[in-house]
Image (cartoon, coloured by chain):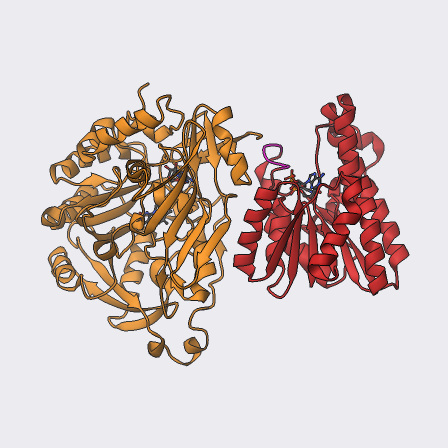
Chain colours: A red, B orange
Amino acid sequence: MNIVIIGASSSIARALALEIGNEDHVILAGRDIDDLEDNAADIGLRTGGTTSIIQFDIADRDMHQHFLDQCIKTLGHVDGIFFCQGVMIDQAQAERDDQLCYSMLDINFSASVLLANRFVQHMRERGTGFLCFLSSVVGDRGRQTLAIYNATKAAINAYVRGLQHRLAGSGVHALLVKPGFVDTAMTWGLYKNNILVSPKRVADDIWRAVRKKKYCIYTPWYWRSAMMFIRGLPRFLFHKIRS
Amino acid sequence: MRRAARQLSGWGRYPLESAECLRPERISQAEKVCTNSHNIIARGLGRSFGDASLNNDHDVLICERLNRLCSFDRPTGVLECEAGVSLADIIQFALPKGYFLPVTPSTPHISIGGAIAGDVYGCNQHLEGSFCQFVDKIELLTANGRVVTCSRERQEDLFWATIGGLGLTGIILRAQIRLLPVETAYIDANYTKISDVDQLFLQLEKNQHNCAYTMAWLDGMAGSKHAGRSLLIQGDHARYEQLTGKMQRRPLRPKRRRDISIPDMWPSWTLNSFTVGCLNKMYYWRHLQHARIVKYQRFFYPFGHLHNWNRLYGKKGFLRYECVIPWKQAATALQKIQEFFDQKSIPCFWAMLKLCRDDENQGLLSFTRAGVSLTFDLPRDDELITQLHNLNDNIIEWDGRLSLVSDAFMRPSDLRHMYPQLEDFLELKQRIDPQNIFQSSLARRLGMIPQ
Ligand SMILES: Cc1cc2nc3c(=O)[nH]c(=O)nc-3n(C[C@H](O)[C@H](O)[C@H](O)COP(=O)(O)OP(=O)(O)OC[C@H]3O[C@@H](n4cnc5c(N)ncnc54)[C@H](O)[C@@H]3O)c2cc1C
Ligand SMILES: NC(=O)c1ccc[n+]([C@@H]2O[C@H](COP(=O)([O-])OP(=O)(O)OC[C@H]3O[C@@H](n4cnc5c(N)ncnc54)[C@H](OP(=O)(O)O)[C@@H]3O)[C@@H](O)[C@H]2O)c1
């Protein structure tokens, strides 16, 4: 399979690329070209598959078409794309700084949609392919600590649900992934150690879901019931828990 | 980079200290640490037993995510990788290609950085030397923020100080090592039961050059009466013809054992002199006195599938008493040490013996020297440390030394007596790191850093 990973420096993305087998060709796309080179060497050695890298900033809209062209030039065609990029900016900071706030909205949501449009088009023409979006459990119900970040994830949820409806029967598949708290740079130092799971565990679940053509997964699985409970909490209770 | 406040300890669970932890995900982030930290130590996978990778109330740089393989030359077996790659990763990667670690400690869950900074050794030390013999090149981040490549030819003083240097010369970012070609993942092993010290040393002397690997498991609970009751374990890498049916089908990919994890709340009373005494007897009697082909995991890492076995010791943890004693004194030392534990009724739950040689080229603070290394795991109680201090005096008398990566209790004077090249090391450290940016709890405890 020919696969593109956006935000390939993220440790979830790295773990994902290692899951993918040795017959596949993977493009690692991201901003830090040095790191992408290191990752590509590592992944190539460990899986025995082919890896290529493309420097790409998803916030740079003018490059989207060029990026798709580059992918097609390298791979011939694209079978799947993972959106692993994301930023999480502290709520207080995002409230103060318009620029930062907007960049988070853009990178996590708008830019993903714009890029997805082009890849959907490409895949529909071939009648096959998949898109996988990394949302988050926190998108299920916004909370005070990261209200804006949560909103970007909720937006992705709504978008992917709609996209799945639109793509039904077309052969193209969209997968929504809602990870719980994962032990990555994003969460380092913010949460208690015992609620974090390893990127490998999450990547395992994601890759299995892709193969089984699932529509929406929580990873690890127990977050599904946890979030059902949290969504069901009446407002007066929910607002009491404000830590 | 964000810091995370954590409680950290070594594998012995003592001491437990707080630290501000940084965890770079990529080399470029690690390279910047000297600009925003003035007191830091590198930490790999935390398998050193005491405080070598702790830095009380200061910064600790956790290298576990710097774990990319960089290049591998299949014909020669030369591997270049980042410092956080674990030996287990390397085996998983290289064994199917017909390569194994040239030197392996009794756990594969340590990082390359830790293997170099602790100059680890295995049960082939007396023939092949320690890990450093197979390290060709180190990329080191030094105190001035620059990355220096050192090797036997370039910056060799820095190279030999970094080997066994406990992270005090800088942060190892990448290293190049040479792997050992093997035909199979199996070991042609040989277990011999031994009942006393004299017989043990006789056998060791006679057989030490027969096999690639030699070690002895000691019954630590045998007491002074049965001191030296042990199992001599020897082995060679099995050749393909030696394998039988099922093994021959997958000579380089043996099935992995299921991992077992010990829960954090494990009650420590379950591990007592009685239960361990029984376990030791079982271990001793179970091994038949003949040769057989075993998986490499079974030979090198008998407890490798038991994750967090250190939790068996409970919250108080344990101390590892690891010393190397010159050949001439070794038999006496073993007898005396077991008598000492017996007298003071210190239970010893695990004990091993390995053989060592002197190397011409060694790290300034490398542990091994010609003789016999003895390792004892002792559950910690409040008096144990003072009791061990008495034993340290004997070790110095026998011209032996204690391992620094295992240490949590030595005194500054012990260090000076045991490591004659300490002054050279400190002089070099002063030169390359005058502000002592790289320091650890161990370095402060042992007076390597002026307070
Ligand atoms: C079950 C068990 C069996 C063992 N058997 C043996 C054995 O047979 N022989 C043997 O020699 N040892 C043995 N050890 C000890 C172990 O191999 C060493 O303590 C090793 O250094 C641990 O590596 P680590 O990656 O866990 O490092 P840590 O424990 O995290 O650190 C050890 C030292 O290395 C330094 N360090 C780590 N990473 C870096 C880096 N990137 N740059 C610079 N400095 C760094 C730290 O500062 C510290 O001083 C054993 C340990 C265990 C738990
Ligand atoms: N960690 C968690 O607990 C958790 C939970 C739920 C969901 N998620 C989601 O999982 C995804 C991966 O997160 P992570 O935890 O692995 O975080 P991470 O390590 O911070 O990774 C985020 C990645 O996104 C890349 N990126 C940021 N902006 C970009 C842009 N404009 N163009 C291209 N790439 C860009 C970053 O690349 P640079 O190297 O250029 O910075 C970085 O590699 C995110 O979408 C996150 O929201 C994480």
Q: Where is residue B366 in the image (x, y as percent from the top left)?
A: 26, 41
Q: Which region of the structure is painted magenta?
A: A186-190
Residue at x 29% of width, y 53% of height: B122
Left or right, B190 with respect to B169, comes to: left
Residue lying at the far left of the rendered structure: B328
Foreground residue, B150 or B397? B150
Task: Characterize the magenta stretch by its predominant secondary structure.
Answer: loop
Q: In which quarter of the image is residue B157?
A: top left
Q: Where is residue B126 in the image (x, y as percent from the top left)?
A: 21, 55
Task: Look at the picture and state if B304 lies above or below A196.
Answer: below
Ligand number 2: quarter of image: top right
Q: Quadrant of the N terminus of chain B?
A: top right
Magenta span has A188? yes
Left or right, A137 with respect to B296, comes to: right
Mark yes or no: residue B134 visible: yes
Magenta span has B405? no
Task: Look at the picture and state if A49 lies above or below A152.
Answer: below
Left or right, B310 with respect to A73, comes to: left
Task: Look at the picture and state if B281 lies above or below A225.
Answer: below
Residue at x 22% of width, y 62% of height: B232
Foreground residue, B63 or B339? B63
Q: Where is residue A26 in the image (x, y as percent from the top left)?
A: 65, 57
Foreground residue, B205 or A19? A19
Foreground residue, B123 or B150? B150
Task: Look at the picture and state if B225 lies above or below B184.
Answer: above
Q: Quadrant of residue B383?
A: top left
